[in-house]
């Protein structure tokens, strides 16, 4: 069989239908095998090959003549066999981990419906699902009215927040560009901010030097008095402070900037308050954590929240919520006549595509809506609280292990646990340099080597990074519902096994 024996090229239902069904059923079998392996703790997380070896191993050539369907099935198998199993309970590497089955089913359906999200005309059901989910998320945040969009990732949503904050102050910028603004706009974010915030400053023409990094405390939280000191200084220099990014769930530490204190400063100085809850936002689904970690969130002007992180929605699903209605459309609308006709037969406020700068927009909502339906609020609440319980278990177990692990924060605010694995020769009894700078630097080297061993072995993946003065350290993340206590025990044992010098 070849591609032209299948729909849509073959229009003869008598042959195309059985051929197409047979092909797709074979694809589904391959997918189901991958799902089984992903959830099998005896399977490896990955088969690591260096890029040069991987290129030799794979047949990726695009040739002159068609490949038969049988080869395409082999290609599908090969792609998954060589893919990292990001839903494996021992993949503890990224903020977005896991393979939620209901959400995945939604993604399969989304691919089959293959529509574009710019107008109600071609995506009626999915546009209404966006209204439902986004409206519910705004309720949870505490925005009485407002507006929301989905964008391809938290970075883009953080940039949208910058654009609409500028638009609110200087609507003429849309037409005249930077000459509409007399003075230098300045924005603020903590030193532990996600890099997309300074990336957004570069992208919208503000310049990274005008994205001022506010010092943090030792837990990685912005220090409000430092923020106010900087704002006051910049104002006295004649600059225009206009935007503060408050991170709730920093990428590495999982730290929460103090919303209410920052909101007080923003109100006093008439500055837009954006909350980057791309990572921590999932905790809003728990009443307990909403109350303890997000006090004051309803005072924000905008909030980024990525269900594809802590909530386990399949990649990608990232949302932006704005307290004031109408700003998104006024900032981004270009009124393309061929899409957004105003004389359509239906209520065109459902044509949401002109609120964003993208034209083509992927359907990121169905998998999220379906996942939410499957759980209700209570199911999501349990899911989120379970992740936090497991995090507490990990910290407890690491403390029980004594000198093998050096926790850099023993009270994590999210599911990030940051630590060094300490090999025997660097433990206090063997190591006179314990806790010195040289000791830290040596642990930084050990960390990168140990990660390399994990990958060669294929048994575990935990990410690492340096940060500020700290050389490389591990950051484990629990956002996969497949993870259990047994996997945390395994991580600790495996690090000790692989970490032996
Ligand atoms: N957007 C931040 C993702 C980083 C991470 O998964 O580690």
Image (cartoon, grey):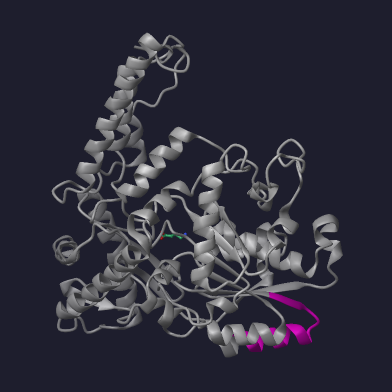
Measuring 17% from the left and 74% from the top, which residue is drawn there? 425
For the stretch drawn in magenta, the main secondary structure is: helix
Q: Is residue 441 visible?
A: yes
**Image position, residue 406 (x, y; %):** 26, 78
**Left or right: 483 with respect to 123?**
left
Q: Which residues are magenta?
A: 227-242
Task: Name which quarter of the figure residue 324 lies in.
Answer: bottom right
Based on the picture, tell me whether residue 402 belongs to the magenta stretch: no
Based on the picture, tell me whether residue 230 belongs to the magenta stretch: yes
**Left or right: 171 with respect to 134?**
right
**Image position, residue 464 (x, y; %):** 35, 64
**Image position, residue 416 (x, y; %):** 34, 70
Measuring 61% from the left and 40% from the top, which residue is drawn there? 360
| In front of the other: 383 or 154 | 383
Exactly how many numbered labels are in the figure? Answer: 0
**Image position, residue 126 (x, y; %):** 52, 45
**Left or right: 466 with respect to 148?**
left
Figure check: 28 above or below 205:
above
**Left or right: 264 with respect to 59?**
right
| In front of the other: 482 or 338 | 338
Quadrant containing the N terminus is top left
Quadrant containing the C terminus is bottom left
Figure check: 30 above or below 93:
above
């Amino acid at each position: 069989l070849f591609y032209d024996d299948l729909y849509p090229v073959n229009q003869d239902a008598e042959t195309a239908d059985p051929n197409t069904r047979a092909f797709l059923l074979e694809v589904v079998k391959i997918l189901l095998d991958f799902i089984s392996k992903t959830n099998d703790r005896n399977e490896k997380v990955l088969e690591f090959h260096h890029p040069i070896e991987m290129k030799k191993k794979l047949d990726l050539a695009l040739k002159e003549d068609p490949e038969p369907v049988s080869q395409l099935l082999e290609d599908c198998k090969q792609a998954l066999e060589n893919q990292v199993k990001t839903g494996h309970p021992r993949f503890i590497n990224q903020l977005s981990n896991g393979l939620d089955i209901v959400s995945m089913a939604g993604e399969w359906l989304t691919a089959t419906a293959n529509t574009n999200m710019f107008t109600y005309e071609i995506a009626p059901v999915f546009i209404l699902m966006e209204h439902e989910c986004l409206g519910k998320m705004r309720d949870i945040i505490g925005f009485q009215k407002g507006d929301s969009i989905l964008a391809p990732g938290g970075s883009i949503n953080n940039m949208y927040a910058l654009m609409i904050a500028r638009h609110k102050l200087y609507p003429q910028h849309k037409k005249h560009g930077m000459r509409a603004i007399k003075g230098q706009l300045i924005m603020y974010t903590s030193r532990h901010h996600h890099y997309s915030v300074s990336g957004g400053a570069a992208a919208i023409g503000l310049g990274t030097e005008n994205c001022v990094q506010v010092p943090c405390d030792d837990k990685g939280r912005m220090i409000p008095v430092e923020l106010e000191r900087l704002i006051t200084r910049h104002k006295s220099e004649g600059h225009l402070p206009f935007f503060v990014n408050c991170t709730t769930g920093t990428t590495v530490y999982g730290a929460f900037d103090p919303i209410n204190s920052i909101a007080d400063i923003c109100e006093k100085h008439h500055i837009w308050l954006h909350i980057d809850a791309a990572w921590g936002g999932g905790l809003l689904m728990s009443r307990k954590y909403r109350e303890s970690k997000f006090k004051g969130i309803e005072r924000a002007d905008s909030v980024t929240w990525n269900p594809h992180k802590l909530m386990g929605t399949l990649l990608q699903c990232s949302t932006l919520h704005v307290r004031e209605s109408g700003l998104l459309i006024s900032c981004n609308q270009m009124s393309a006549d061929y899409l957004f006709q105003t004389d359509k037969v239906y209520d065109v406020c459902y044509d949401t595509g002109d609120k964003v700068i993208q034209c083509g927009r992927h359907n990121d909502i169905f998998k999220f809506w379906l996942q939410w339906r499957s759980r209700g609020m209570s199911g999501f609440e349990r899911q989120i609280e379970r992740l936090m319980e497991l995090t507490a278990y990990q910290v407890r177990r690491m403390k029980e292990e004594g000198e093998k692990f050096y926790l850099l924060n023993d009270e994590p605010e999210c599911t990030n646990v940051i630590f060094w694995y300490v090999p025997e020769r660097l433990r206090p009894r063997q190591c006179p340099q314990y806790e010195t700078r040289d000791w830290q630097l040596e642990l930084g080297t050990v960390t990168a080597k140990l990660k390399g061993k994990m990958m060669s072995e294929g048994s575990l993946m935990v990410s690492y990074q340096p940060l500020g003065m700290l050389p490389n350290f591990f950051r484990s993340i629990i956002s996969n519902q497949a993870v259990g206590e047994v996997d945390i025990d395994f991580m600790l044992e495996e690090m000790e096994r692989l970490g032996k010098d």
